[in-house]
Image (cartoon, helix red, strand yellow):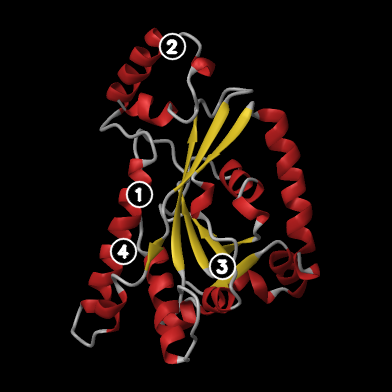
Amino acid sequence: MSDSKVLHSVIRRIADWSLWSFFTEVRVIGGEHVPLDGPIIVTATHHNMMIDPAILSSKFPHRRVLHYWSKASLFANPVLSWVLHSSGNIPVDRKSKNRQDLFRGTIEALARGDAVALFPEGTSYTEPRIMQVKDGAAWAALEYTKWAAENGVKGGPGVRIIPAAIVYTNKSKYRSSVIMTFGEPISMDEYKEQFFSDLEGAPRAAAKRLTRAIERELVEATINAPDWDTLYSARMARDLLWEDERSIDLEEFVTISQT
């Protein structure tokens, strides 16, 4: 790991210890879908503001450093800027109307072959289903693809989006478990022609299509219900069949709970 990310290494080690002490197991499924190197954007579900980044960074395949988005204004202070850079954060200027400027830090990270991680639902939540996935990840991936084409970047498959679903068997219970499932990489090949088009509305339409693809992957790998009553009824049925939830194979937990 680069010396410039020494704080990230320290934080990840603390996360390792914390997760080991609180959870019985963090099961990673689909780790083979995560490339060993090359530019990727990881789009993860977000049920807990503090624990989700810890799980994602601690258990990410190949121990790749994940770069998270932070407000660009926070980097104005030299000391805070060092802390943010050293812990793997990259600036995002949300006030910019120019998307190439908005995603400048993201594009620079992807151009180095780094992994960028974000939570496309926008905020952590406690709801019985996936919240609406926002377009930021899709725009970032497609803007990088456009930048790479304009700057003659060749070689490799280009940036890919890796959906990551984080599911807690009981997120408020000590010594419960976590399942983190990585979906198959989403290539930009299906979307870039429309995004590069000069037709009015074409880039936005491409970003919307890509966002829907991300959302489908996340919904498929998580537990979703139309309302709390339905979710509680499903949990009661599961608990009747499996009195001890620890007897459920974590590989099957999401499928059983969703059914």
In contact (CB < 8 Å): disc 3 and disc 2:
no
Report which residue position mark 2 lands on: 242
Closer to the camera in the image, 47 or 61 = 61
Q: Tag 1's secondary structure?
A: helix
Side of 245 relative to 226 (left or right): right
Closer to the camera in the image, 160 or 104 = 160
Give the residue at the far bottom of this rendering.
151
Amino acid marked by disc 3: Lys
Amino acid marked by disc 2: Trp
Amino acid marked by disc 1: Glu
In contact (CB < 8 Å): disc 3 and disc 4:
no
Q: Tag 4's secondary structure?
A: helix
Q: CA distance from mark 3 to mark 4?
A: 24 Å
The image position of residue 154, as x and y in percent, is 48, 85
The image position of residue 196, as x and y in percent, is 29, 83
Side of 131 relative to 54 (left or right): left
The image position of residue 184, as x and y in percent, is 41, 53
Q: Mark 3 against mark 2, which lies toward the viewer? A: 2
Q: Residues within 10 Å of mark 4 (few under 14, many from 20)?
A: many
Q: Residues within 10 Å of mark 2 (few under 14, many from 20)?
A: few
Mark sitting earlier along the chain (3/1): 3
Q: Mark 3 against mark 4, which lies toward the viewer? A: 4
Report which residue position mark 3 lands on: 71
Which quadrant of the structure image shows residue 126? top left
Q: Residue at x 47, y 91 (%)?
A: 152
Q: Residue at x 42, y 50 (%)?
A: 183
